[in-house]
Image (cartoon, rainbow, N blue to C red):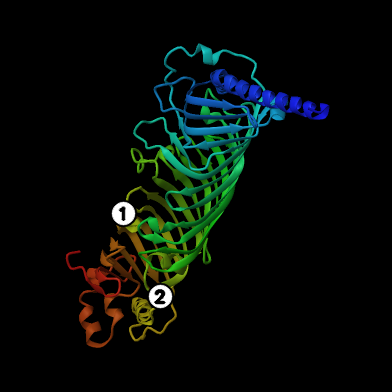
């Protein structure tokens, strides 16, 4: 055999032997490296996050690059067993390079998570068992994960009170970068909101994690909420879009943003309006309570400003004991367009009356699968100035009332009069109850108490019509002569006549008459 061929053979045998030796070394190393790595990973994470960690199985391989695969991970905050685990994980896979392991801090290139469930709980009960191992103060190891992908994750936030349901978010896209125990991590998330259904995209910073009190964990970000279907709430419809930003800690997040619903419709009215809002809010991300300060709505030529919130933080007697989703607001409109307001709740087109309106009202919307008109609660008062009815026949009757009440019985209702209305109202269970409803035109004032069915449009009012003229002065001829005998009965010191009246029937077919019992 030639020397060169013999040399090649020796090199080949040596290389083959080295490969066999390396393979055997890898197999032998893997057998003892996996348990060692398992103990190391558990120790690092427990110390970093002050929690107790359990891993069902863990396999470590070194070729062609360092890689770890595990399953059945359970992560308990500070070892607590009285609340659900902070994190459960069906499977995870982590990989890096040898260079990254030699860097400072040590780096994991990517981590893939499957079946991630995060549960954040609040409560004052102390951890069970011996947690001294967890709470011992040791220098934190330098450890950084460059990227975590956790698509299909679920987040649940449990409130302090046991009778309140947890907040749940299904996150179908989630990417975290620069993940370490001593720094905020960057996140990008996409999730489908449950109610109203719509797509939310959010990005920002989260952390560092506060193990002693999760609610103190910092969070910042921006969001886009698109194509949210308001039709899931009975009685309204429309597609909402919203953008905004937020910052703070989990239990006190300061948020601001804007929304637009170009086709917002209340079923009771049936007219679509372009509703825009801007808002500032303080959100308790741990129990879901939200304060609005304020939310400003714009539709047509009308602006409504509301302060209040969602949840029991409101302290209102109307919402105490109810579920978290109850909305309670104090709303104010100054010099709004009456037609804008009527379009929301009245089917007629054009709206039955035009003018300027101011009102303030308490608004309460409890949860429940009922039409918004049935469960909406309002309690307030309003003033309408320079009102005119859009139906010529009705406006003519109003003008005739003014003329007759002023002592001009030959008037034919062609005078151009405006009406002023004011009163207090309560909307409850789909019916509006009016107190001190006052309708004024030159020469006459009508005062009424009664109810109006928002869905049925039924009228039931009782009150008085106060005229400047005497009863006999409202007509001519024989009628005027006969009514002179009644003038002393209906006359008062401050008016020519006060007549008891009633209004019944429906909005489209009202019935006017004397209230003889009155």
Residue 494 image point, x, y percent: 34, 65
181 w.r.t. 262: above or below: above
183 w.r.t. 406: above or below: above
Residue 157 image point, x, y percent: 45, 35
Residue 43 image point, x, y percent: 56, 18
Q: In the picture, residue 468 is in which quadrant?
A: bottom left
| Residue carrying label 1 | 370
Q: Quadrant of the C terminus?
A: bottom left
Mark 1: give few (<14), some (14-19) or many (20+) Cα within 10 Å: few
512 w.r.t. 455: above or below: below
Q: Identify the residue at the far right of this view.
A: 3
Residue 349 badge: 2
Local secondary structure at mark 1: loop
Total marks placed: 2
Front position in the image: 58 or 81:
58
Q: Indicate left or right for 473 with 280 as reference.
A: left
Q: Is residue 337 visible?
A: no
Q: In the picture, residue 1 is in which quadrant?
A: top right
Residue 99 badge: none
Local secondary structure at mark 2: loop
Front position in the image: 164 or 65:
65
Tell us which disc is closer to us: 2 or 1. Answer: 1
Q: Indicate left or right for 15 with 396 as reference.
A: right
Mark 2: give few (<14), some (14-19) or many (20+) Cα within 10 Å: few
Q: Is residue 215 visible?
A: yes
Q: Indicate left or right for 79 with 473 as reference.
A: right
Front position in the image: 4 or 385:
4
The reply to whether callout 2 and callout 1 are in contact (CB within 8 Å) is no
């Amino acid at each position: 055999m030639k020397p060169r061929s013999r040399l090649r053979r020796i090199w080949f045998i040596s290389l083959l032997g080295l490969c066999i030796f390396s393979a055997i070394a890898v197999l032998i190393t893997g057998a003892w490296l996996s348990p060692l790595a398992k103990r190391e990973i558990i120790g690092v994470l427990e110390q970093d996050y002050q929690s107790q960690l359990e891993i069902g199985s863990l396999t470590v391989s070194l070729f062609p690059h360092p890689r770890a695969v595990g399953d059945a991970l359970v992560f308990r905050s500070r070892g607590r067993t009285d609340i659900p685990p902070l994190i459960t994980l069906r499977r995870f896979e982590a990989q890096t390079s040898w260079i990254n392991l030699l860097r400072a801090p040590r780096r994991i290139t990517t981590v893939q998570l499957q079946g991630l469930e995060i549960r954040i709980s609040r409560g004052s009960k102390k951890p069970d068992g011996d947690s001294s191992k967890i709470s011992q103060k040791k220098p934190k190891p330098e450890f950084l994960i460059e990227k975590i992908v956790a698509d299909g994750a679920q987040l649940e936030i449990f409130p302090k009170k046991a009778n309140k349901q947890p907040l749940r978010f299904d996150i179908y896209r989630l990417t975290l970068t620069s993940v370490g125990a001593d720094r905020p991590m960057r996140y990008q998330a996409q999730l489908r909101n449950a109610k109203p259904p719509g797509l939310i995209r959010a990005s920002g910073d989260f952390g560092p994690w506060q193990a002693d009190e999760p609610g103190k964990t910092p969070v910042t970000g921006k969001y886009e909420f698109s194509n949210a279907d308001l039709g899931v709430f009975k009685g309204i419809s429309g597609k909402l879009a919203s953008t905004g930003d937020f910052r703070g800690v989990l239990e006190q997040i300061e948020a601001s943003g804007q929304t637009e619903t170009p086709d917002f419709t209340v079923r009771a009215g049936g007219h679509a309006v372009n509703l825009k809002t801007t808002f500032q809010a303080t959100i308790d991300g741990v129990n879901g309570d939200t304060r609005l300060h304020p939310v400003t709505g714009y539709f047509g030529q009308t602006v409504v400003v509301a302060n209040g919130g969602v949840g029991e933080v409101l302290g209102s007697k109307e919402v105490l004991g109810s579920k978290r989703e109850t909305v309670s607001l104090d709303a104010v409109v100054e010099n709004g367009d009456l037609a804008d307001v009527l379009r929301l709740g009245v089917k007629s087109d054009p709206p039955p009356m035009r003018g300027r309106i101011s009102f303030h009202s308490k608004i309460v919307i409890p949860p429940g699968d009922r039409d918004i008109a049935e469960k909406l609660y309002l309690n307030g008062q309003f003033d309408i100035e320079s009102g005119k009815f859009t139906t010529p026949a009705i406006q003519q009757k109003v003008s005739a009332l003014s003329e007759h009440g002023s002592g001009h019985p030959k008037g034919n209702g062609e005078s151009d009069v405006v009406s002023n209305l004011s009163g207090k109202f309560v909307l409850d269970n789909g019916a509006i109850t009016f107190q001190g409803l006052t309708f004024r035109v030159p020469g006459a004032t009508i005062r009424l108490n009664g109810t109006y069915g928002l869905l049925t449009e039924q009228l039931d009012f009782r009150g008085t019509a106060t005229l400047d003229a005497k009863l006999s002065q409202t007509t001519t001829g024989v009628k005027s002569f006969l009514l002179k005998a009644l003038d002393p009965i209906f006359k008062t010191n401050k008016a020519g006549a006060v007549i008891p009246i009633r209004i019944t029937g429906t909005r489209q077919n009202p019935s006017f008459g004397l209230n003889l019992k009155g």
